[in-house]
Image: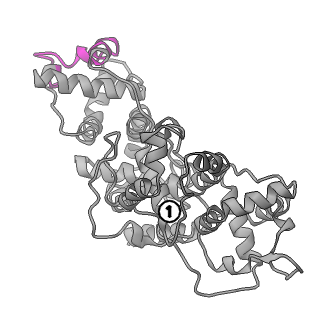
Amino acid sequence: MKIKILFYVFFITILISGFILSGFTSKEVIKQNNSNGIKLPDNPIEGRFVFEQKGCINCHAINGSGGKKAKDLGEKVFFGNDYNLIADMWNHSSKMLKLMEENNISKEEFNAKEFRSLRLFLYDLRYLGKNGNIKSGKKLFVKMGCTHCHSVGNEKTNKIRLDKTGIYASPVYLAQTMWNHAIKMQTVQKSSNIKVPIFKDDEFSDLSSYIRAVSVYKSKNLKYMTPGNPVIGKKLFSDKGCFFCHNEKHIGPDLTKIDLNKSVTEIAGMMWNHSLEMEPAMQKFKIAMPAFKGNEMADLISYLYFSNKQQVNGSADIGRKILSEKGCINCHVSGNPYKAAESKLIGPFNSEDEFFSDLWNHLPLMQKNLYFKNKSLPRLLPSDIKSLYLYFNRERKK
């Protein structure tokens, strides 16, 4: 029953964001790697079942549905990459395990596939974003100079009506429409001394919510977009010329060095802002400004989001030092009374997720052994986690 409840809550979350599920529930398996070696997700939202089945929902809610004992993961969405997540779980494990014990909640173990599904699901919550603020959108409509050329809600002479865009639930549709008209819009704005709007945070979502709220076209059948398919987005990145400018010729900035761990509407805003610089550069190199149709902008943004994870530094040599400095080696030696595996016998791991799941599964035993020694679990940084992973894999591969 809880799985159904969580599914409906997550489904509603997607609807609020203006998406439908089909983009991430396709039977097509996405296993392609991008240029920086990051494996693109096959189905990020399937992790909602792991979230329920492993009991995470007993303490954590998603947008109000679930336990109240820990933070709502829909309200305080996860930021960061894989190593940030496991470091966060590690450093909070003492509180988590104590809370689970007090409430008679059994600690479930994860295999590598389950852990991957869970972290992709948590990471995906950030991407979907939240519903826009209508009041903020109304202020933006005036502040950004939209009223100079457009009207919505009430027809005005010589104004281009935006009411029909109100039938599109996803704010990405507005972003896509504005992008396709960027050159024309910006030319008119500059010639009329109207400041070209710059978007920040989720302002695209706010603006879209306002237009939809006051539109005279009220439809019971709102049109939705899919959250985006990263593999299709990867192809679009090449087909639309993005790869040529950002990777091949380095005309545009290196996107791997830009923080894109943001919601889909935040990234859409960044793309619009970027169009101001793109247009003159593309004219110089005689490249046509790319246009988008259907679900293409959502597909492209999903590729940027899932392939642009912040890199974490680490090395096997540092991992060896951490074992000693953090006291891990005191237990992971031959003949130890705690039945802990020797450090030289740990690994190799086929993936980070196999390492993450093993680390999580052994936390109760580690906590118990440290308790009897009157010690607490050492805090680990994301770079520490990566260094340990590299160390264990290197040692066994020799």
Residue 138 horizontal side relative to residue 382, left or right: right
Residue 200 versus residue 288: which sits nearer the camera? Answer: 288
How are the colours assigned in the image?
one colour
Q: Position of residue 189 (x, y in %)?
A: 80, 58
Residue 272 horizontal side relative to residue 347, left or right: right
Image quadrant where one finds the C terminus = top left
Residue 227 versus residue 46: which sits nearer the camera? Answer: 227
Tell me which amino acid carries mark 1. Ala
Residue furthest to the right in view is 157
Indicate whether residue 291 is drawn in magenta: no
Residue 377 appearing in the image: no
Residue 368 versus residue 233: which sits nearer the camera? Answer: 233
Give residue 222's quadrant in the image.
bottom right
Q: Position of residue 268 (x, y in %)?
A: 59, 56
Residue 302 versus residue 274: which sits nearer the camera? Answer: 274
Indicate whether residue 332 is drawn in magenta: yes
Residue at position x 76%, y 58% from top?
187
Q: Which residue is mark 1?
A: 298
Residue at position x 56%, y 53% from top?
263
Residue at position x 29%, y 59% from top?
30
Q: Position of residue 144 (x, y in %)?
A: 81, 57
Residue at position x 34%, y 28% from top?
385
Give residue 3's quadrant in the image.
bottom left
Q: Position of residue 31 (x, y in %)?
A: 26, 54
Eyeballing the image, is 112 above or below 232?
above
Give residue 6's quadrant in the image.
bottom left
Magenta-highlighted residues: 319-343
